Image: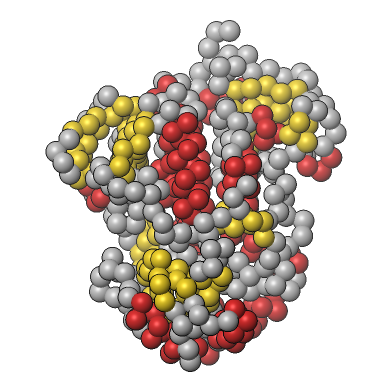
């Protein structure tokens, strides 16, 4: 029997597999496709996902295959400048195709000991108080202590456990594909810029291999969006908006997506959980989808590993829904807002012009980018005394310089960490789960507390210098102490 079976081998499932393997969890990833995808629908990692890779020692691999971008326009195409003074050591977007991200995460998960099986489609499941039985399309039966559905917006796992997926259906549809264009590059750029003055869902971005990533509004919403569009459909829509199809030919892949927004009512039913697109779908505006799923996995991984290991405090696994459901709801809201701002209707264009003026203010620009990049996320952890708690509580802590290097460099093992500038605190009883780093270097404004307790996902579980408060936080997030 496996500890955890993950249905779906996309970025979310692969990230989760790697996180679980950090803690020795026996994990199996089931992927129904025979080969890795060549469709790079997502094109980059936002700041929080970059930090996540840094916290696990993976960032150098990604930087070697990506390109750092500090351009504006990530919120509905508004704002020409990347904001200054973002609260991060990684103030950029990493442009990297999804297929490369999946390859790197696969290498990481397999290297850590995860098992990945392709051509394996989950078709049935049942659970009891001890585990989950899974049935595959070929009749194979497997059993695990837990199952996580990372199997996309049409999630079989979500349907089998009867979780509702309320929201709004698609009202508009967009065509996306990679193909060759015979028109000169300067013509493509000039015509694209002119069209985007009134239509934001249009563009042709040159790629490294001489092809273009082409996006154009569809004529309507297809009855069956699983059927890809044809090259002729692309050509017709390009001519409708640009007066030319740019000589489009030799497509590598073609797809369509809508602006539907839906969210699972629950992220957990017994021993079955949902993550990534299985838990939420939304338009790709702002490039948040892949990032949201990876961050789901980062939140869930250590909590599920704690349950498997037997040290999880009561209710720990339920905090996954409690923390990530509101985050996804906020993303659905900001993508809805972006879609409205990208409409060609007179009212929407008037609001867009007004917001374009506001984005000219540094504070507004930074606020919107913090939303898109997820560094503004703060989990509601409350406080033991019912007060609001320290200003850092619930926030992820940026990477800071220490005498021993940098903070994120000490978090590669996925353990908790007490960063102690007082030298007078202790994690005795939790040393098997929490590292204690005494570092009195003056980090100035980077750390506004004498000491902080970080969860394995880098979010602050406690800040201050009160020993009793620290003990309460250790027990709340890392379970009962053990004898040293």
Compared with 197, 150 (above or below) is above
Q: Who's the residue at 59% across and 68% down the image?
A: 75
Left of 7 or right of it: where is 95? right
Q: Which residue sits furthest top?
A: 484
Q: Number of labelled discs?
A: 0
Position in image of residue 18 (x %, y %): 47, 35
Compared with 414, 50 (above or below) is below
Position in image of residue 244 (x %, y %): 48, 89
Position in image of residue 312 (x %, y %): 45, 25
Left of 454 or right of it: where is 400? right
Compared with 252, 406 (above or below) is above
Q: Who's the residue at 53% across and 25% down the image?
A: 478
Give the image quarter of residue 51.
top right
Give the image quarter of residue 93.
bottom right
Q: For residue 400, say whether it is visible.
A: yes
Left of 8 or right of it: where is 64? right
Q: Who's the residue at 46% across and 83% down the image?
A: 247
Q: Who's the residue at 49% across and 36% down the image?
A: 108
The quarter of the rendered structure image containing the N terminus is top left
Q: Which one is nearer the viewer's eye here, 62 or 217?
A: 62
Q: For residue 330, say whether it is visible.
A: no
Compared with 82, 414 (above or below) is above
The quarter of the rendered structure image containing the C terminus is top right
Position in image of residue 32 (x %, y %): 28, 47
Left of 297 or right of it: where is 263? left
Q: Which residue sits furthest left?
A: 139
């Amino acid at each position: 029997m496996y500890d955890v079976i993950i249905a779906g081998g996309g970025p979310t499932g692969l990230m989760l597999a790697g996180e679980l393997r950090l803690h020795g969890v026996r994990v199996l990833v089931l992927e129904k496709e025979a080969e890795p995808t060549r469709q790079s629908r997502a094109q980059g990692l936002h700041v929080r996902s970059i930090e996540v890779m840094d916290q696990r020692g993976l960032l150098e691999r990604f930087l070697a295959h990506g390109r750092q971008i500090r351009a504006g326009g990530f919120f509905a195409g508004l704002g020409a400048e990347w904001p200054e003074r973002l609260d991060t050591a990684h103030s950029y977007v990493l442009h990297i195709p999804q297929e490369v991200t999946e390859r790197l995460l696969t290498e990481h998960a397999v290297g850590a000991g995860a098992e990945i099986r392709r051509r394996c489609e989950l078709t049935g499941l049942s659970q009891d108080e001890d585990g989950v039985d899974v049935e595959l399309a070929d009749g194979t039966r497997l059993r695990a202590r837990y199952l996580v559905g990372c199997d996309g917006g049409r999630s079989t796992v979500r349907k089998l456990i009867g979780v509702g997926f309320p929201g709004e259906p698609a009202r508009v549809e967009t065509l996306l594909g990679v193909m060759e264009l015979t028109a000169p590059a300067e013509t493509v750029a000039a015509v694209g810029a002119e069209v985007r003055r009134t239509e934001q869902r249009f563009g042709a971005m040159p790629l490294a291999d001489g092809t273009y990533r082409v996006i154009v509004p569809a004529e309507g919403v297809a009855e069956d969006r699983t059927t890809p569009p044809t090259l002729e459909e692309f050509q017709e829509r390009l001519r409708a908006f640009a007066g030319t199809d740019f000589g489009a030919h030799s497509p590598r892949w073609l797809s369509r997506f809508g602006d539907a927004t839906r969210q699972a009512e629950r992220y957990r039913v017994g021993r079955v959980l949902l993550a990534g697109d299985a838990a939420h779908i939304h338009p790709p505006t702002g490039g948040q989808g892949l990032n949201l799923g990876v961050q789901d996995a980062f939140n869930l991984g250590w909590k599920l590993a704690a349950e498997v290991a037997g040290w999880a405090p009561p209710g720990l696994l339920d905090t996954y829904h409690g923390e990530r459901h509101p985050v996804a709801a906020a993303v659905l809201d900001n993508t809805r807002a972006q879609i409205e701002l990208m409409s060609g209707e007179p009212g929407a264009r008037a609001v867009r012009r007004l917001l374009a003026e506001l984005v000219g203010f540094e504070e507004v620009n930074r606020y919107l980018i913090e939303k898109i990049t997820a560094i503004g996320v703060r989990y509601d952890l409350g406080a033991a005394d019912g007060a609001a708690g320290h200003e850092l509580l619930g926030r992820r802590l940026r990477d800071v310089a220490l005498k021993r290097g940098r903070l994120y460099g000490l978090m590669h093992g996925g353990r908790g960490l007490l960063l102690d500038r007082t030298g007078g605190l202790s994690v005795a009883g939790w040393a098997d789960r929490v590292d204690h780093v005494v570092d009195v270097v003056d980090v100035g404004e980077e750390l506004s507390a004498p000491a902080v307790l970080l969860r394995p996902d880098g979010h602050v579980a406690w800040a201050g210098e009160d020993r009793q408060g620290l003990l309460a936080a250790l027990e709340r997030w890392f379970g009962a102490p053990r004898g040293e």
